[in-house]
């Protein structure tokens, strides 16, 4: 554990990690058994917004929370994985204000009770932690709960929700092929598994027509009221503002606080999802939510801190946990937009785990980045060897070097650009685990 994770709850979870197998074992049998032993807390939750997708599900969760909280509603939020601290997975709603991460004693107590109810039976730690979500959300009143799928959809441990207020499917691309299939249509079928008969569905922007076909046909078969991005709702930039449109008309909004044009479609999906779930959020609350949304580790700029100190003076340092080719494309587009506004040399500091596609990720940055530095990941034992990762970057066409740490990479870049009049732009990414390491080392963990 990092120093930030050295907590009572972290200790209890580390004990579970030592006892139970790591990774995922997609099935609903174990979580269903455990929840029954706990009195089925998943049946005592407020209206649920259930979110799946390859990319964008965290952002749409953040936007949905921001919109609802701006309207004065209390909002529980479950996300995974965490960046620095286990507590980030559980945000408990506060009436009339912003929700707060669960306190350490409350989380530790819930973890112990769930582990005791499991009685030593075979289970994954993710399933235990998902059961903890249901226990916490059932025991603390709120107006709405937003739950992010961990992996896939159909057999994800969150998919014991029988009547979601709305199911949201965000952009789907290739990822986790070993679990979900090697074609986007197969992955879409797994994600579509969170749809429930007769319950509303919002389908976010999809690049692949085959993906849209799978999702829309599933919704039609289940009789789900359906909203599709580009057909029933959409958003675009106009004169420095975000214009959202659906059958109700237009909303003239500020640009999202989260950078990148891809966030326009994510914001639109959140507005539509909140409305589809039955919450009549006024336009003024939508404006406040879009302008104030926060989502750590996703195109987050490091404004200072212990680690940023190693970098060049006045450098722009960004961190982003996107880790697949689809994410690489939207992050690269964001970097290109930054370049249009202010030209700076771009350097990449990348670490990845061994279930990802480095080549597809690196290709997105060709003709944008000057050089790639690869680093190890402390937060996962599945991290790719930086030497092998540098070779992948080189095979795509980059000048690439393997280094021992992000601090060393920032120092090397500082020396490279020492006499350059324009401070560089630096992107640290390729893995949420790496972003977690960076935020912990920088002394700026999510709150």
Image: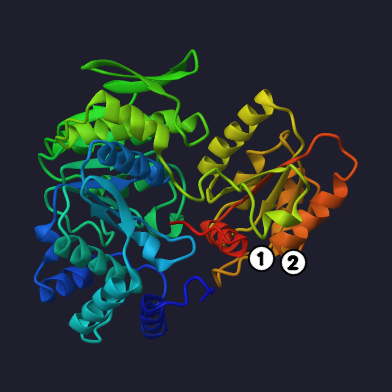
In which image quadrant can residue 135 be found? bottom left
Q: Is residue 313 above or below residue 176?
A: above
Q: Is residue 207 visible?
A: no
Which one is in front, 276 or 207? 276
Task: State yes or no: discs 2 and 1 in contact (Cβ < 8 Å).
Answer: yes
Residue 20 at what x, y percent from top left? Answer: 36, 81
What residue would you read off at disc 2? 404
Q: Look at the image and tell me in which quarter the C terminus lies.
A: bottom left
Picture residue at 36% right of the left edge, 60% below the top: 89
Residue 335 at what x, y percent from top left? Answer: 63, 34
Report the residue that reaches farthest toward the front: 96
Residue 376 disc label: 1
Which one is in front, 17 or 443? 443
Seen in the image, is 141 located left or right of residue 359?
left
Residue 118 disc label: none
Pointer 2 local density, CA inside 10 Å: few below 14, some 14–19, many at least 20: some
Picture residue at 69% right of the left edge, 58% below the top: 389
């Amino acid at each position: 554990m990092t120093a930030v994770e050295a907590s009572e709850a972290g200790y209890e979870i580390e004990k579970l990690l030592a006892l139970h197998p790591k990774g995922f074992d997609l099935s609903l049998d174990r979580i269903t058994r455990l929840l029954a032993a706990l009195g089925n807390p998943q049946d005592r939750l407020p209206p649920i917004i259930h979110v799946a997708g390859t990319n964008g599900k965290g952002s749409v969760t953040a936007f949905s929370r921001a919109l609802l909280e701006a309207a004065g509603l209390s909002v529980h939020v479950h996300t995974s994985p965490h960046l620095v601290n286990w507590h980030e997975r559980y945000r408990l709603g506060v009436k009339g204000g912003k929700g707060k991460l669960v306190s350490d004693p409350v989380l530790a107590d819930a973890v112990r009770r769930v582990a005791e109810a499991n009685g030593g039976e075979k289970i994954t730690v993710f399933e235990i932690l998902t059961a903890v979500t249901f226990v916490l959300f059932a025991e603390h009143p709120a107006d709405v709960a937003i739950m992010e799928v961990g992996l896939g959809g159909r057999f994800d441990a969150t998919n014991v929700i029988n009547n979601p207020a709305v199911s949201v499917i965000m952009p789907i691309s290739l990822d986790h092929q070993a679990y979900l299939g090697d074609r986007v249509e197969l992955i879409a079928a797994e994600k579509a598994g969170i749809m429930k008969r007769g319950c509303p569905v919002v389908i976010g922007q999809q690049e692949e027509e085959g993906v849209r076909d799978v999702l829309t046909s599933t919704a039609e078969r289940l009789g789900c009221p359906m909203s599709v991005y580009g057909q029933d709702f959409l958003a675009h930039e106009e004169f420095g503002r975000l214009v959202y449109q659906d059958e109700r008309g237009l909303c003239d909004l500020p640009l999202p606080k989260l950078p990148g044009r891809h966030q326009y479609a994510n914001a639109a999906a959140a507005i539509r999802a909140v409305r589809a779930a039955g919450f009549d959020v006024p336009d003024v609350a939508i404006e406040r939510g879009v302008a104030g949304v926060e989502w750590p580790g996703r195109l987050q700029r490091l404004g200072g801190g212990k680690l940023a100190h190693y970098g060049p003076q006045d450098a722009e340092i960004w961190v982003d946990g996107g880790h697949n080719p689809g994410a690489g494309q939207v992050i690269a587009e964001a970097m290109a937009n930054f370049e249009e506004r202010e030209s700076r040399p771009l350097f990449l500091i990348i670490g990845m785990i061994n279930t990802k596609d480095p080549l597809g990720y690196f290709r997105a940055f060709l003709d944008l980045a000057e050089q790639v530095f690869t680093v190890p990941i402390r937060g996962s034992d599945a991290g790719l060897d930086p030497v092998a990762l540098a070779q992948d970057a080189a095979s795509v066409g980059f000048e690439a070097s393997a280094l021992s740490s992000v601090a060393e990479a920032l120092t090397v870049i500082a020396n490279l650009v020492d006499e350059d009049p324009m401070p560089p732009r630096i992107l640290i990414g390729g893995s949420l685990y790496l972003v977690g390491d960076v935020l912990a080392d920088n002394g700026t963990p999510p709150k």
